[in-house]
């Protein structure tokens, strides 16, 4: 698979090239490499947010591009959990309301489920606070809770610990590790220390996989 940005310009940029990845159920995969090596681009393509310039992404043996944009968005909503470096929480909603946005529901059982997830992430006592009233680490956990609400089959985390100190970073990784039984987890990071327990590390250098 490869991805080229600015295809129509004279000088085009390869975000990554000749990458072949097969993600297996219930494995944790690290995508490692320095800034600009193509980690985010690879996650965008794997999660169907961007179409590769060459190659195909298969999800459950189905070419993901066979689906319409709407269907792809539905797959992302119902099967994937996305966590980014920036938490993208909505400032005027409480932590609980933010978590519920991912399934767009206020049903009693969904509120209970959200509270259970917040409990697992040790921030249920902060459910009524706004993102601005909690710490960076707590905000990232709230973003993780939101990503877990739909019981994702695949969790894509792009630099999920970049805004955290080492202890908080390890805690977040520990939390993600716990979901390994339920989901495939893909973590892109420049920080090798947080990938200690991953099953597999794919190392990128300037858009290419390092053998
Ligand atoms: N939207 C874009 N348009 C053009 N080039 C981009 C765009 N996004 C990223 N790039 C380029 O693609 C390469 C890979 O970027 P990225 O996937 O963000 O790397 P990483 O996440 O490892 O820092 C870099 O050279 C970057 O400048
Ligand atoms: Mg990136």
Image: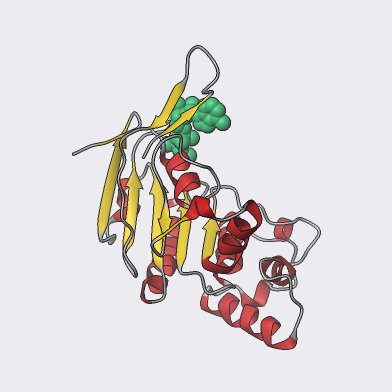
Q: Is residue 141 above or below residue 39?
A: below
Please provide percent x and percent y for residue 154.
45, 64
Q: Residue at the spot x=37%, y=71% of the render?
A: 180
From this viewpoint, which residue is outermost toward the front? 66
Q: Is residue 55 above or below residue 29?
A: above
From this viewpoint, which residue is outermost toward the right? 92
Please provide percent x and percent y for residue 164.
50, 51
Quadrant housing the N terminus: top left
Could you tell me if residue 161 is visible in this image?
no
Q: Residue at the spot x=41%, y=48% of the render?
A: 188
Q: Quadrant of residue 37?
A: top left
Please provide percent x and percent y for residue 16.
38, 33
Q: Quadrant of residue 139?
A: bottom right
Tell me: 52 left or right of 108. Answer: left
Q: How many marks?
A: 0
- Decide which of 79, 101 is in the foreground and name it: 79
Q: Residue at the spot x=39%, y=65% of the render?
A: 184
Please provide percent x and percent y for residue 195.
31, 54
Tell me: 122 left or right of 133. Answer: left
- Decide which of 24, 33 is in the foreground and name it: 24
Could you tell me if residue 171 is visible in this image?
yes
Tell me: 33 left or right of 157. Answer: left
Q: Residue at the spot x=28%, y=62% of the render?
A: 197
Q: Is residue 8 above or below residue 30?
A: above
């Amino acid at each position: 698979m490869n991805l080229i940005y600015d295809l129509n310009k004279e000088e085009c940029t390869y975000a990554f090239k000749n990458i072949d990845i097969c993600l297996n159920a219930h494995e944790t995969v690290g995508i490692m490499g320095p800034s600009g090596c193509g980690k985010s681009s690879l996650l965008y393509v794997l999660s169907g947010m961007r179409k590769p310039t060459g190659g195909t992404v298969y999800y459950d043996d189905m070419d993901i591009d066979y689906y319409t944009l709407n269907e792809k968005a539905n797959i992302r909503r119902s099967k994937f959990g996305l966590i980014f470096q920036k938490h993208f929480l909505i400032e005027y909603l409480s932590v609980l309301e933010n978590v519920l946005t991912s399934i767009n529901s206020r049903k009693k059982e969904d509120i209970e489920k959200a509270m259970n997830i917040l409990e697992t992430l040790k921030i249920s006592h902060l459910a009524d606070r706004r993102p601005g009233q909690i710490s960076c680490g707590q905000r990232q956990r709230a973003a993780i809770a939101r990503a877990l609400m739909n019981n994702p089959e695949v969790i894509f985390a792009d630099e999920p610990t970049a805004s955290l100190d080492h202890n908080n970073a390890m805690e977040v990784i520990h939390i993600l590790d716990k979901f390994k039984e339920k989901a495939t987890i893909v973590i892109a990071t420049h920080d090798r220390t947080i990938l200690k327990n991953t099953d597999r590390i794919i190392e990128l250098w300037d858009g290419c996989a390092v053998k």
